[in-house]
Image (cartoon, rainbow, N blue to C red):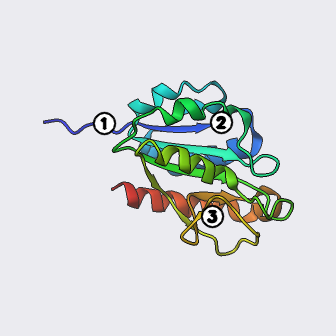
Amino acid sequence: MAKKEIKAALIYSFATKKTSTAAKLIKENLNELNLTEIDAEGLNAGELEQYDILIAGAATWFDGELPTFWDEQIPALEDLNLKGKHVALFGIGNQVEYPEHFGDSIGLLADVFASTSAKIIGATSTEGYTFEDSKSVRNNQFVGLMLDFENQHNLNESRIENWCKQLKKQLT
């Protein structure tokens, strides 16, 4: 019997500079997954059920909000059945200017994807970050990868590489 091909998607807004930069590095580091890139701004949530692995990225807007294109998808996302699927999240935030909402976006997305019975993977340490509060922290860890382009851009590449290595281990 032939082994089932694993289908993986990388979902982010193609129009966002920082999230796109991170997504491209993630795709390079996970090239063996042959990720299908999906523009979050034109997302048809129902299509996500065909994938085994979803890697989704979002910046945190304003006072801890999801970008509008993600926020508008929440009702459709909540209707999905992603039981048996893996979801990894990466987020962009600014811990200096928004310390009370740092990286809230991936916490909000984690709640939505968890409600679909998906398994959230890729938690990372909060060590090395300085912030007051974040909806993305569970059990003293971020629910995914947090990146701060404004204040720690020099750490992004190594954080992405390490996170991708971690995801590969969690997926095998």
Local crowd at mark 2 within 10 Å, few (<14), some, or many (≥20)? Answer: many
Q: Considering only order in the chain, which callout, 1 or 3, is on the residue closer to the N terminus?
A: 1
Given the image, on which type of amino acid does mark 3 rest? Ser
* Vertical placement of residue 168 versus 49, above or below: below
Mark 3 and mark 2: span between their CA atoms?
27 Å
- Where residue 107 sits, quadrant-wise, is bottom right
Count the marks. Answer: 3
- Where residue 170 sits, quadrant-wise, is bottom left
Split into 4 quadrants, where in the image is the N terminus?
top left
In the image, is 18 to the left or to the right of 124? Answer: right
Seen from the viewer's position, the closer of residues 151 and 154 is: 151
Q: Residue furthest right?
A: 97
- Residue 158 numbered mark, or none: 3
Q: Which residue is mark 2?
A: 70
Split into 4 quadrants, where in the image is the C terminus?
bottom left
Seen from the viewer's position, the closer of residues 161 and 54 is: 54
Question: Does the image show residue 1?
Answer: yes
Seen from the viewer's position, the closer of residues 163 and 69 is: 69
Q: Which residue: 70% across, 44% down?
A: 19
Contact between labelled residues 1 and 2, with CB atoms less than 8 Å apart: no
* Vertical placement of residue 45 versus 123, above or below: above
